Amino acid sequence: VGPYAARVKIERIYDIRAEKRKKIVERARTILYEWEKSKLPEDDMILKELEEALLKARVIEYGPDKLPAGPEVGKSEELIIVEGRADVINLLRHGYRNAVAVEGVKIPRTIKDLSAKKKKVIAFLDGDRGGDLILSELQRAGVKVDLVARAPYGREVEGLTGKEISDALHHAIPFDEAIRRLKIPKEVPQLPEKVREYAKEVEGKLMAIILNSDVQEVERVPVSELAQRLQELRDQAKYVVFDGVITQRLVDILSEVGIDVYLVGVRVGEISKPSERVHIITFDNL
């Protein structure tokens, strides 16, 4: 060794490749053991994750508000309005490609414009207070809705199975009926005390009083003539207090004024197209 003489004696020969294979096998066993311990997701979970990724890729952004929607929301004759993006994805999973999400309680203008173009519009909402609030906002915003479907009480649309979705849509009820079933306390606008006094004055007399923005009388008319006179005096009307039923016809007349107007009557009839500018108040809520 080096500058010195040396003798070499071979005592044993090792196959290094075999040793390497042994180490690889041992390492593989360790990895497999740790893998099993970590509970790798089952095949169906992996497939579900892949499906979820594909469905998300098929969700489009619709309209100026870029709302999450199914790929056929623009060309389908029917529209399903849901609450959020996850609802759109779940409906896509079960073959419903014409859903659009409002993405919050405030109803975007895109929803109103889109629904007006459709032959049939279904609001498919969660079975909770959030769904109630959105339904109320759809009415307040004047969105065209024909039917209302709800998830079972306490459930969300995003978590429903295909059968549950089908059942809910099959048992959808007319929009007006759904509104009547709502039990959301409505905020009553603060009215001048003089309006309350006029309400007491006309009650039981089938009389109507039209008031201007200064709460001054414009005219007193019998309830039977109110609609006709409002068409002539609507530009002067700010408060209309009368002993009668608040109807869609009265709302339509006052909705063209362009300012906030207050209809104060005994009770509310069937209002299918509410106006954001016409505030409806009953005597009981004064």
Image: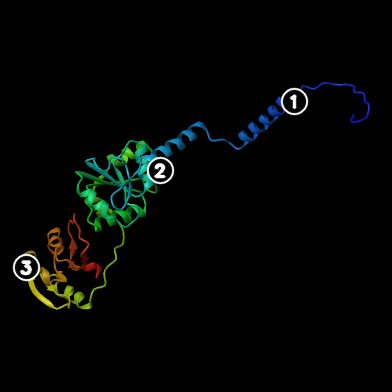
Residue at the spot x=35%, y=39% of the render? 92
Question: Which of the pair 140/6 is nearer the observer?
Answer: 6
Query: Is residue 206 in view?
Result: no
Residue 232, numbered label: 3
| Mark 3 burial class by Cα count in 10 Å: few <14, some 14-19, many 20+ | few
For numbered disc 3, what is the local secondary structure? helix
* Left or right: 160, with 267 as reference point: right
Query: Label 3 sits on what residue type?
Result: Glu
In contact (CB < 8 Å): disc 1 and disc 3: no
The CA span between labels 1 and 2 is 54 Å
Q: Position of residue 16 (x, y in %)?
A: 76, 24
Residue at the spot x=56%, y=35% of the render? 40
In contact (CB < 8 Å): disc 2 and disc 3: no
Q: Earlier in the sequence, mark 1 or mark 3?
A: 1
| Mark 1 burial class by Cα count in 10 Å: few <14, some 14-19, many 20+ | few
Q: Where is residue 14 in the image (x, y as percent from the top left)?
A: 80, 22
Query: Label 1 sits on what residue type?
Result: Glu
Which is closer to the viewer, label 1 or label 2? 1
The CA span between labels 1 and 3 is 103 Å
Q: Position of residue 282 (x, y in %)?
A: 21, 66
| Mark 2 burial class by Cα count in 10 Å: few <14, some 14-19, many 20+ | some
Query: Label 2 sits on what residue type?
Result: Gly
The residue that disc 1 covers is 19
The residue that disc 2 covers is 159
Rendered view: 69 above or below 21: below
The CA span between labels 2 and 3 is 53 Å
| Name of the residue lying farthest toward the right | 5
Residue at the spot x=6%, y=68% of the render? 232
Rendered view: 212 above or below 39: below
* Left or right: 152, with 77 as reference point: right
